[in-house]
Amino acid sequence: MGNPNLSFLTVLLSIPIFALIFYSLSYILDNFFARKLYIKTVTWILIIYSLVAYLLFAINHDYHGLGVVYGKYLVKNKDFNPILFLQSYLILIGHFTFLAILGFQYNSRLRTVIEMNKEMQLRLDEQKLRQEYEYASLAQQVPPHLLVNVFQSWAYQIKASHPVLADQMDQMYSLIHYFMESSHPDAPRTVLLVEEIEMVRQYVQIENFVSHVPLNISWQVSDAVHALMLPPTTLMTLVMNALKHGDAHCSDKPVEIVIQPAPDSVEIHVRNPIPAVRKGLASHGLGLSNLSRRLEMTFGSGHKFVHGFTSQGYSAEISIYKCGSLN
């Protein structure tokens, strides 16, 4: 203010001071003010303003040799005028403070728009995946439905001549229908244990009917746990695994299905002896792996699932803690 002799070169050499104000304030607003650290914001702004004031004062008084670079800023043959200095100072910090605030607001709105676009894209992707999953699920239900219709037709045709076989087909139909309902995307995540036990008993009856040697299965189920909720086909997976890979015909060691309450949990144990000669059936581990994942998604840390070989055979144990809640 009051110096008409400024050159364009001197103005260019002033850019570092302009940049100091703008970028320092922008950094403070983005990293402190945006995080509601207001004390740090005010403190650092005062530090920057004080530094700029000192630089302007040093330039006007040729301190530290700054007059060599900013010589045109020196008001020659005039006393230092604090009023003009204050006006220059306020105009300088005012302009670049205003620009820093505008930049902060623009960046804040831009980040908001970007986050909204990302959220919208995630929702669209989720909706697309859900539709693809639902379509795949509906497509996979076509063969089972056809199979169910075939079973019903056969059962109706042979009901008069082979009532036992017809009854077995009805049980198979109920079993297939249970699997179909359990795998539907809109199906409940849990079912009553008593319903699961009924389906497992039907499965065991079918296996016993087609087996040349009676199955040796021991049931120990407490009535106090019938109201337990668990993912559908939980017990079915354990029993099918035991009958597939274990020795269910051993007269000395039965396949044990034990469901009992404990002080702080409900315990589900399925133990089976190992046959002397392996059956040669491939084990991919998918059934138990999928069951473990479903239990985790349903109960979270409110359960424990361990399985493996023991000295008595193969054991699978599920503990559902009473203090745990469904996710």
Image (tube, rainbow, N blue to C red):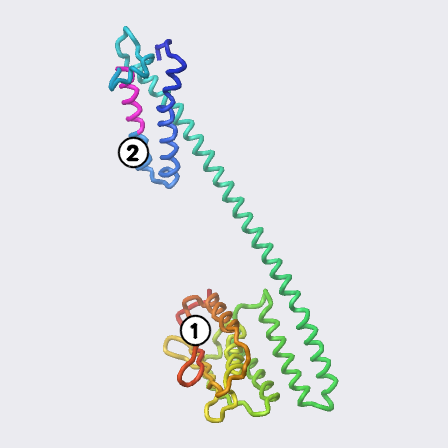
The residue lying furthest to the right in this view is: 157
Residue drawn where x is 44% and y is 80% of the image: 315
Disc 1 from disc 2: Cα separation: 56 Å
Q: Position of residue 23 (x, y in %)?
A: 38, 30
Residue drawn where x is 40% and y is 23% of the image: 95
Residue drawn where x is 41% and y is 27% of the image: 98
Pointers 1 and 2 in contact (CB under 8 A)? Answer: no
Q: Pointer 2: residues within 10 angstroms few (<14), some, or many (20+)?
A: few
Q: Position of residue 196 (x, y in %)?
A: 54, 78
Is residue 245 left or right of 88 when viewed as pictured?
A: right
Residue at image mark 1: 305
The residue lying furthest to the top in this view is: 77
| Quarter in which the N terminus is drawn | top left
In the picture, residue 167 is in which quadrant?
A: bottom right
In the picture, residue 84 is in which quadrant?
A: top left
Q: Which residues are magenta?
A: 48-61
Q: Earlier in the sequence, mark 1 or mark 2?
A: 2
| Image disc number at residue 43 | 2
Q: Position of residue 91 (x, y in %)?
A: 37, 20
Indicate whether 4 appears above or below 244: above
- Amino acid bearing label 2: Thr
Q: Position of residue 57 (x, y in %)?
A: 27, 19
Q: Nearer the viewer, residue 246 or 145?
A: 246
